[in-house]
């Protein structure tokens, strides 16, 4: 006669595996708690930059189209922003879309545009943006974006323009080389018009012509890149001269709170010498 307990047990269930999973969850929770306490006692970076990478790779290993990865990555960014707000990080810069990304297949770029517009509308209604008084600024070439995306982003910028407690920079249609080239062209034009002499050109003059002009503390203390790639991919080339970089071998949709805490702990363990 069939044992009733075995009959009711779901197929492929493994009590031993479930026990191990619960144990791992407990260890994860304890480790996260320990990391948070450890990191909170150190000096937090004032400005964190994030090179958001690995969405397409995450989708590919699952046999899904790239846009599914971008969707999962966009959702993860919402979590990351919450974590950074709670940790008290003053300024955050997200590398969302590079000028090089715009050369990807049109259907993929259009999906990214859709997600940017959707998330901009969502941020506009997010109570945390107003609770923490987060000022949002888009850095990059808005003229390369569709009108509906520009409209959504500018509404967000306008709604937060008087906020002065936290700062969120969205690098969209952004390229570090292009930013520097455009600054050089603007300065050259001012010299040509007699508004500026070559002797007046210094670092401060140059920085006033960058996309980050007006951003408090535009130079990131810490830059994190997901996906395992170890390059900066044209991100904040001028501003990152003395940034600390942490490259993490995890695709963006799989990025965890402990990954963020570990990156900050790595930053805190380094001696920042600024060339001295």
Image (tube, helix red, strand yellow):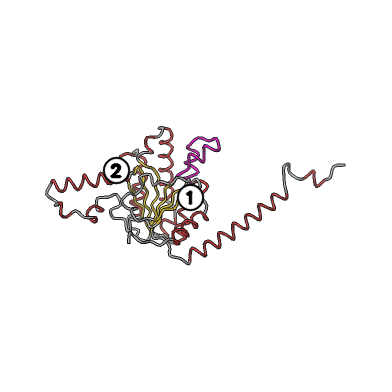
Q: Residue furthest right?
A: 1
Q: Is residue 98 above or below residue 221?
A: above
Quadrant, the C terminus: bottom left
Magenta residues, dominant SS class: helix
Disc 1 on helix, strand or loop? Answer: loop
Q: Nearer the viewer, mark 1 or mark 2?
A: 1
Residue at image location 52% in from the left, 37% down from the top: 60
Residue 66 falls inside the magenta stretch: yes
* Residue 115 is a magenta residue: no
Question: Which residue carries the number 2 mark?
Answer: 178
Q: Classify 3 as above or below 165.
A: above
Name the spot of residue 166 as percent of width and height, x first: 38, 59
SS label for mark 2: helix
Q: Tell me if label 1 and label 2 are in contact, CB under 8 Å.
A: no
* In the image, farthest residue toward the front: 276
- Mark 1 = which residue? 248
Q: Nearer the viewer, residue 227 or 141?
A: 227
Distance in Å between CA atoms under marks 1 and 2? 27 Å
Name the one closer to the observer, 196 or 199: 199
Whether residue 147 is visible, yes or no, is no
Q: Is residue 162 left or right of residue 42?
A: left
Q: Could you classify mark 2 by the number of other residues whose Cα lies within 10 Å: few (under 14), some (14-19), or many (20 or more)?
A: some
Please report whichever mark, 1 or 2, sits nearer to the chain's N-terminal start.
2
Q: Position of residue 198 (x, y in %)?
A: 15, 51
Please provide the residue range marked out in magenta: 52-75
Residue at the spot 72% in from the left edge and 42% down from the top edge: 12
């Amino acid at each position: 006669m069939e044992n009733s307990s075995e009959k009711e047990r779901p197929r492929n269930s493994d009590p031993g595996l479930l026990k191990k999973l619960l144990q791992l969850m407990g260890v994860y929770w304890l480790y996260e708690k320990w990391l948070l306490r450890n990191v909170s006692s150190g000096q937090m970076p004032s400005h964190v930059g994030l090179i958001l990478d690995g969405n397409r790779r995450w989708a590919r290993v699952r046999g899904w189209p790239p846009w599914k990865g971008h969707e999962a990555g966009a959702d993860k960014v919402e979590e990351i922003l919450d974590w950074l707000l709670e940790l008290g990080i003053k300024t955050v810069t997200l590398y969302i879309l590079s000028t090089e990304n715009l050369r990807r297949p049109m259907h993929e770029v259009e999906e990214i545009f859709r997600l940017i517009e959707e998330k901009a509308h969502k941020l506009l209604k997010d109570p945390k943006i107003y609770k923490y008084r987060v000022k949002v600024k888009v850095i990059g070439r808005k003229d390369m974006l569709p009108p509906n995306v520009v409209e959504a982003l500018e509404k967000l910028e306008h709604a937060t323009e008087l906020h002065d407690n936290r700062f969120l920079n969205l690098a969209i249609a952004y390229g570090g080389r292009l930013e520097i080239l455009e600054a050089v062209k603007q300065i050259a034009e001012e010299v040509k018009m007699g508004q500026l002499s070559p002797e007046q050109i210094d670092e401060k003059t140059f920085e006033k012509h960058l996309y980050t002009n007006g951003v408090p503390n535009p130079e990131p203390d810490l830059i994190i890149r997901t996906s395992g790639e170890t390059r900066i991919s044209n991100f904040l080339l001028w501003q990152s001269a003395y940034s600390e970089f942490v490259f993490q071998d995890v695709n963006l949709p799989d990025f965890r709170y402990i990954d963020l805490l570990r990156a900050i702990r790595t930053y805190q363990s380094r001696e920042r010498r600024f060339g001295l």
